[in-house]
Image (cartoon, grey):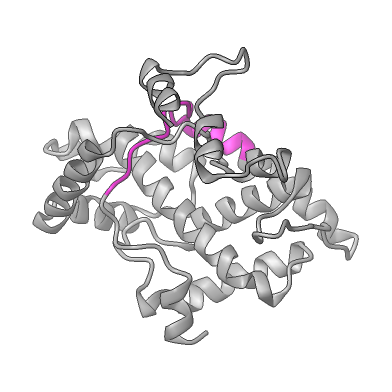
Amino acid sequence: MSQDHDEECSTQTEVGKPRRTNSPKFNPDEDGKRRATIMTRVHQVRTRGQRIEVSFDAKGQPLGKSGDELQSWIGVLAREHIPIWISDFRSADLAPRKELVWMEVVTSFTVDESHKRQVLKSCGESAKGFRYDLYQAFVRDHIDEENVWQRPPKVVHNYPTITQEDWEKFIQYRRSPEFKRLSEQGSEIRKKSKYGSTGGRDGYRKRDQAHTGKYAERYERWLDMRVKPDGQFKKEEFKNIAETI
């Protein structure tokens, strides 16, 4: 994979990220169960010498149940192959690992080369989200304590590929002046964002696929994501915006 291609399909330097407003709190045990489910499914298909069929919409997003399985599998691969201590997914050192992720995907799903950029982008986002979850769950409130250097039991149990050395590098970076600076930058950016995403794990993907052709204008799509099933806006400020458009 070329360096130019890596640059195109990468995520930006990590500065931390806010959790989507309607996403459940990170639970390593539940995450482990989800990973076990998709790993079993993929293993069963592979042992039959088959691949899971996946279709894509016009934007290159995977469709339906098999699309969800693909997204879940990419998340598993991000946890398995992308080190938790990296700070930038664009690093050239990650090229072999990205290629391994891609080969794992095409071995298990009917995904062709035209979707490689999107797959690797999704991998980078999953890896970044996982690092964020680990930090929030196990590190943030204990960053200055000595026992933070030891892998938490839930990490050891649910993520055996994370070694003690990996964990120490992860903590070292999270304690560094560079991370503190980037974290503060991210905090300032989030303060300026008045309207966080409310689309859950898949953002606009499933909403777009369920309402193909519904949105004549971009603002209609934005507003629709902020309406509850009963037709009421999730926040009064969203209603006020809708009335001014």
Q: Residue at x 20, y 50 (%)?
A: 174
Q: Residue at x 41, y 76 (%)?
A: 7
- The answer to whether 51 appears left or right of 189 in the picture is right
The image shows residue 134, relative to residue 180, as above or below, that is: above
Whole-percent x and y of residue 191?
21, 36
- The answer to whether 168 appears left or right of 93 in the picture is left
The image shows residue 222, relative to residue 74, as above or below, that is: above
Q: Residue at x 22, y 39 (%)?
A: 192
Q: Residue 57 lies in what quarter of the image?
A: bottom right
* Camera-side residue of 100 and 14: 14
Q: Residue 188 lies in what quarter of the image?
A: top left
Whole-percent x and y of residue 220?
55, 36
Which stretch is magenta?
Answer: 16-34
Q: Residue 173 lies in what quarter of the image?
A: bottom left
- The answer to whether 72 appears left or right of 178 in the picture is right
Residue furthest to the front = 244
* Camera-side residue of 49 and 127: 127
Image quarter (top left, top right, bottom left or bottom right) of the C terminus: top left
